[in-house]
Amino acid sequence: MEAVYRAVFPRRSRSRIFSVTDNELNDTALMARLAAGDMEALGDLVGKHQDRVLSLSYRVLNDWHKAEDVGQEAFLRVHRAASNYKSTARFTTWLYRIVVNLCFDAQRSQARKAAPLDGASRCGG
């Protein structure tokens, strides 16, 4: 019976389930270290999540330069909020919400810049 179980659920698959949990604990531990002033923890978080943050922001904004700006601002906000961080949700859920909110802010800002002012379309009248 155990051989059948191992054939259906190889050890590798089971360890993935545990690695997700370990990964989340690792993010929480990194946030605790960052809150204590360990800037190396911020570097670890950036290294670990930067690709997905940039990918998400690019998908929303469709502009690589703006996506990079959003990514930088997101990690600055992570740094600022480290002392108040509570792990009520997964770290990545919290981080991606920051990224999406920043993307929406960037889109609103761009829309405001593009909107003509009253009377701007009438020249010389």
Image: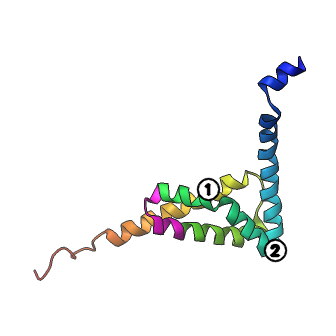
Asked if the magenta segment contains residue 62, the reply would be yes
Here the colouring is rainbow
Label 2 and label 1: CA atoms lie apart by 22 Å
Horizontal and vertical percent for residue 120? Answer: 22, 76
52 over 39 or under it: above or below = above
Judge by depth and name the residue closer to the eye, 101 or 60: 60
Near mark 2 (Cα within 10 A), the count class, few <14, some 14-19 or many ≥20, is few
Q: Is residue 32 magenta?
A: no
| Residue under the image location 50 percent in, 65 percent down | 67
Q: In the rendered structure, which segment of residues is drawn in magenta?
A: 60-69
Q: Residue furthest top?
A: 1
**Which residue ends up furthest to the left in the rendered image?**
125
Quadrant of the image containing the N terminus: top right
Determine the main secondary structure of the stretch shown in magenta.
helix
- In this rendering, the answer to whether 88 lies above or below 1 is below
**Which element carries disc 2, helix, strand or loop?**
loop
Q: Quadrant of the C terminus?
A: bottom left
- Amino acid type for the residue under numbered disc 2: Asp
Instruction: Residue 66: give x, y in percent of width and height.
Output: 47, 68
33 or 54: nearer the viewer = 54
Q: Give the image quarter of residue 87.
A: bottom right
Q: Amino acid at mark 1?
A: Tyr
Percent across and percent down for residue 24 are 78, 52
Image position of 33 (left or right of 69): right
Horizontal relation, residue 124 to residue 59: left or right: left
The mark found on residue 82 in the picture is none
Residue for badge 2: 38
Q: Position of residue 73 (x, y in %)?
A: 59, 71
For label 1, the residue is 96
Residue appearing at x 81%, y 76% in the figure: 37
Residue located at (87% from left, 21% from top): 3
